[in-house]
Image (cartoon, helix red, strand yellow):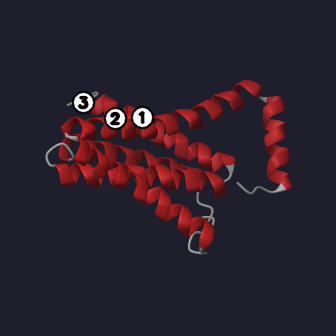
Amino acid sequence: MVRSSQELAEEEVRKRSHPIAYALNRFVVALSNAVLGGTLLSQIIQAFGFNAEFGIRSLATIALPPIVIAYLAFFTRTFRSPQPASDFKYYFLFAGWVILLLTFINFVGGDSPYAMLFGMFCLSTTLSLWVLLARGLPFRSLLSCAYGILSGFLFYILLFGIRSY
């Protein structure tokens, strides 16, 4: 992540002035990564539960988005840092997307293997774009995304519970 010296100085001030809040915010970012990664891992385990061929297809499905996004981000000028938006918009965008994604994975994705692969593809794309955004967004906006991911996950659990097959 390329950040200006002013951003680095501001982050250093936050660390010193509010160390508990800073540590909590870092934990929230890590936890949001764990939620997305854990859901993806659960999907891989379910895919290998069907048979080995489907498990390997799911691994290929999951590997495709990070490869394409990494290529576009590092070797072309296609992806640029997003235009600054309000942190409020990032929060609701990620919260809504996680609710929709989990709903699709758990209620539609289990009906057919192709729908399950599509759900894994969307989840892998989400995780890859999340990592890409982490490079270019200010920490405050990144926190809005992380809190949105966690809020969407918790709201989904509130509505539907934890569903396993």
Q: Is residue 109 above or below residue 150?
A: below
Which comes before the other along the chain, label 3 or label 1?
1
Query: What residue is pinned by disc 2?
Result: 42
Answer with left or right where residue 137 lies relative to residue 14.
left
Q: Are marks 2 and 1 in contact (CB under 8 Å)?
A: yes
Foreground residue, 6 or 50? Answer: 50
Q: How would you rate the neighbour count of disc 1 (Cα within 10 Å): few for under 14, some for 14-19, many for 20 or more?
A: few
Answer with left or right where residue 49 lies relative to residue 126.
left
Give the image location of residue 5, x and y in percent. Answer: 85, 54
Which mark is on residue 38?
1
CA gap, disc 2 to disc 3? Answer: 11 Å
Residue at the spot 51% in from the left edge and 47% down from the top edge: 91
Which comes before the other along the chain, label 2 or label 3?
2
Residue at the left extreme of this rendering: 111
Query: What residue is pinned by disc 3?
Result: 163
Answer with left or right where residue 19 lies relative to residue 136.
right
- Which amino acid, by three-letter code, is at mark 1? Gly
- Which amino acid, by three-letter code, is at mark 3? Arg
Secondary structure beneath disc 1? helix
Give the image location of residue 3, x and y in percent. Answer: 76, 55
Q: Are marks 2 and 3 in contact (CB under 8 Å)?
A: no
Q: Are marks 3 and 1 in contact (CB under 8 Å)?
A: no
CA gap, disc 3 to disc 1? Answer: 14 Å
- Which amino acid, by three-letter code, is at mark 2? Ser
Give the image location of residue 26, x and y in percent. Answer: 65, 34
Residue at the spot 57% in from the left edge and 35% down from the top edge: 30
Give the image location of residue 103, x and y in percent. Answer: 27, 43
Foreground residue, 106 or 24? Answer: 106
